[in-house]
Amino acid sequence: MLRFLYSMKVRFALMLGMLSAGVAHAALPAGFVYLEDTIPEIRIDLRYSGSNNFLGRPVAGYDNARAVVSTPAAQALARVQADLKPFGLGLLVFDAYRPQRAVDDFVQWAEDLSDVRTKPAFYPNVDKQNLFKEDYIALRSGHSRGSTVDLTLVARDSGQALDMGSAFDFFGVESWPEHPGLTPQQRANRLLLQALMVKHGFKPYPKEWWHFTLEREPFPDQYFDFLPR
C-alpha cells in the first residue's frame, strides 16, 4: 500500500512538472525565448517589475515577469557574453521584451503631470511635460517587438555593475552615450559595451547608453502584448 501511494505521488509530481513546463513554453509565441534559457549565467534585474524605476512602482504587464527576447537577439547576446568572459565581465539586463500594455502605462504616467515623485532621481533637469517631445516616452517602443534590450556590464564574480556615469533610466544628457562630462573610466566602460553590442549586430540609441536594438530584428513591424510567465 505504501509503495502504491509513493508511486502515485511520484506520478502526480511528474504530471504537475510537465503541466508547468507546458504552460511556461505555451506562454511564448514562436520566435521568442526566455533569456536565461539561452544564457544561463546572464544576470537579470527587471526594473519594471519593482519600484526602482522612473514610475516609482511596478509597471503593468510585469507581474511575475521573466526576461524574454526574440531568438536571434538571444543568440547575439550570447556572443556578447562570450566576448566579455575573458575580461571577467558579463551582462546585466534591466529590460528586454516589453508588452504594449506596459508602454501604455508609461504613457498614462507621463500624461499625469501631477505625479512628479521620481523627478529628483530620474529626470531632475527635464520638465515632465517635455518627456514626449524629447523622445524619452513614446506611444510605441522597440522593446515590444522583442529585439531591444536595456543592459549594462558587471563583474562576473561579484555582480558589481561598472560605473557608466549615470543610472539606468535617467532622463538627461548625462545618459547620452557621447556625453562629454564623463571620466575616462566611465567613457571606456560605455565604449566597451557599445563596441561589443555593435560587433554582434545591435545598434545603439543616441539618448540612452544602455539601450540597443538588433539591426536585423525578426519582427520589425509587429508590437506584441503577450505576458511571459
Image (spheres, helix red, strand yellow):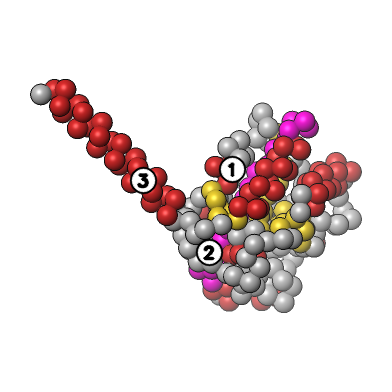
Amino acid type of the residue tagged 1 in the rendering = Thr
Q: What element carries label 1?
A: helix
- Residue underneath mark 1: 38
Q: Could one spot residue 149 in this view of the protein?
A: yes
Amino acid type of the residue tagged 3 in the rendering = Ser
How many C-alpha atoms fall within 10 Å of the one at disc 1: few (<14), some, or many (≥20)?
some
Magenta residues span: 85-104
Amino acid type of the residue tagged 2 in the rendering = Pro
Q: Which residue is drawn at 66% across and 28% down?
A: 157
> Is residue 41 positioned above or below 32 on the image?
above
Q: Where is residue 16 in the image (x, y as percent from the top left)?
A: 30, 42
Q: Position of residue 204 (x, y in %)?
A: 77, 58
First in sequence: mark 3 or mark 2? 3
Measure the C-alpha gap from mark 1 to mark 2.
Answer: 21 Å
- Residue underneath mark 2: 99
Q: Where is residue 87 in the image (x, y as percent from the top left)?
A: 78, 32
Q: Is mark 2 on a helix, strand or loop?
A: loop
Q: Which residue is drawn at 10% across and 24% down?
A: 1
Q: Is mark 3 on a helix, strand or loop?
A: helix
Does the magenta-highlighted stretch encompass residue 201?
Answer: no
First in sequence: mark 1 or mark 3? 3
- Residue underneath mark 3: 20
Q: Position of residue 90 (x, y in %)?
A: 70, 38
> Is residue 208 positioned above or below 19 on the image?
below
Q: Could one spot residue 170 in this view of the protein?
A: no
Do the residues bearing badges 1 and 2 touch, measured as CB atoms within 8 Å?
no
